Amino acid sequence: MNSKILSPLRRDGYKAGMIMMLIALSTMLLTTACSSDNDVITNNENINKKGYEIPVTLNATRQGDATTRATYNPDTRMLEYSTGDQLYVLGNHSTAGMFYGTLEWKGGIIFSGTITTTNQYSGSGVELLSSSKWARAILLPAGYNNYHYITINNPGFSGHPYAAFATSKATAIEQFSNESASGYNNGFELLPQNAILNFTITGLTPNTEFAVELWNSYYSLVEGNVTTNGSGTATFAIGIDISMCKAPATTVDIDDLYNKGWDLRIKDNNNDYVLRMLDDNNPLVTSSKPLVAGHIYNITRSAAPVGPTYPSISTVTTSDYGKVVCAAGHLHDANTPVPSGCTGVGVIAKVTDGGHGLIMSLQDADENSWTLINLCTSVTYAGSTMKLLADWMLGSLPSYTSLGSIAVSNWCVASKDDYIAMFQNLGSQSNADPKSYDSNVNAKITSAGGKALNDGYNWGYWCATEGWSFCNWSWDIESDHNDPVVSKYVRPVLGF
């Protein structure tokens, strides 16, 4: 792992020498670097130069060994000790004075080793712990000294950064959860003091190393490097001290991280992405659901550019006449082709109550005869009864039973009254009575990338009302409705 842990101790605006102890104390003994008791722990030369060793074997349970196991993700080893784990014990006794010791894991929940005291003590190690003024313990995960997160200074230990970076969730949980106990009672009960933020970032350049930084306008909380996979996805985790924003409170609302300007920056030589910690529309936690020590928060973000959003056809009103509809069911500006990546279908030509209506196609279907059209199934959409064309009658038009999530009728031939209404809604100024299509209607269609309705001279378009067809200059009662060989144009519609 190539990472760099940054402590706010190194940043302007933070009191020099201040350290965050790994154990959350209920007393004031280890709370500040200027405490006189803390000076005894870290600077007592007597215990460093001559000590008295007492063997001890004790139990140390972990959160989740009993009823709280659900706090952790089952695919990690967080709740299982492993070879090389150690337990650092620290305390003060009225007779023995200050004491400390690093104990080795022996299996199960048992740790064994030697405790060194300032003064001579005749009792056992367990008696020492049971009668001490106070006793603390912290888990030293196997290989902890490779991560420079916990540093032991007998007696005592140095402060740790507010956050630490890992390239995997398992490593973050095992190394940066900061499991500790603030008292001895027939053993130590270790509880995590940190939360784990587990990130999955998509939309990055595949197989590329990126620098990751959790930062605000004042300083970096943590930095690290991660390499994306072949799909451009980066996965990494950060162990974070929950008291970082609201000390000395024991929980912090992750909204505060957002409100205080915490961002995730991911960058390589060519790109620099800044991602908000939280999704504004779906916050990870809220003021009533704070960031909790021991919990794992899965945060997924995309670094891919976010395109514009478009309203759905389910929201249409009469003010949307002429707007272009794409195959995803979105409304786009009138008189403009749909943007790249979208497929234009038609224009909004009729709207009824409740966001329903008719979409006039940008293209003709196959020419056909009235006899065959009349044999098609009748369907009713948006209050209109129409003839549903068979797929083989559509020509080059794709079949649509839905646009995005909105169900549609598939292509139909509409009634005379529907076509008259649609032409009026699309701005027809035709002299025909009733109005037919004209150059204004065709402009709405062609500007959206469609094909103009033909002039219809001696040809015309069928409607689903028996006895009627239309061209751009008239509506006619057609004597050839019953002639199976006479074909006319078909400009179909979709009902929704």
Image (cartoon, rainbow, N blue to C red):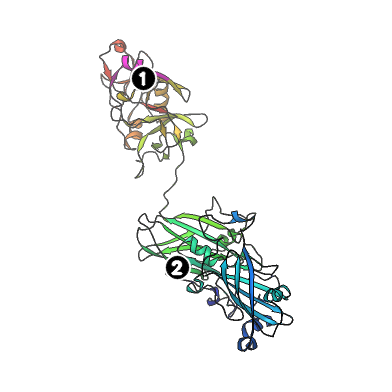
Position of the N terminus by quadrant: bottom left
Q: Position of residue 35 (x, y in %)?
A: 67, 80
Of residues 377 and 452, the one nearer the viewer is: 377
- The three-letter code of the residue at mark 1 reads Cys
Circle 2 residue: 224
Marks 1 and 2, how far apart at CA: 67 Å
Q: Position of residue 182 (x, y in %)?
A: 67, 69
Q: Which residues are magenta?
A: 365-378
Tell me the residue at 30%/28% (across/down): 364
Mark drawn on residue 6? none
Q: Answer with left or right where residue 242 lies relative to residue 357.
A: right
- First in sequence, mark 1 or 2: give its number: 2
Residue 417: quadrant of the picture = top left
Check contact, mark 1 vs mark 2: CB within 8 A.
Answer: no
Q: Answer with left or right where residue 352 lies relative to residue 451.
A: right
Q: Position of residue 121 (x, y in %)?
A: 70, 82
Tell me the residue at 67%/71% (across/down): 25
Secondary structure beneath disc 2? strand
Secondary structure beneath disc 1? loop
Q: Position of residue 38 (x, y in %)?
A: 66, 80
Position of the C terminus by quadrant: top left
Mark drawn on residue 463? 1
466 shown above or below 304: above
Q: Is residue 415 magenta?
A: no
Residue 469: quadrant of the picture = top left
237 shown above or below 18: above
Any part of residue 477 in sight? yes
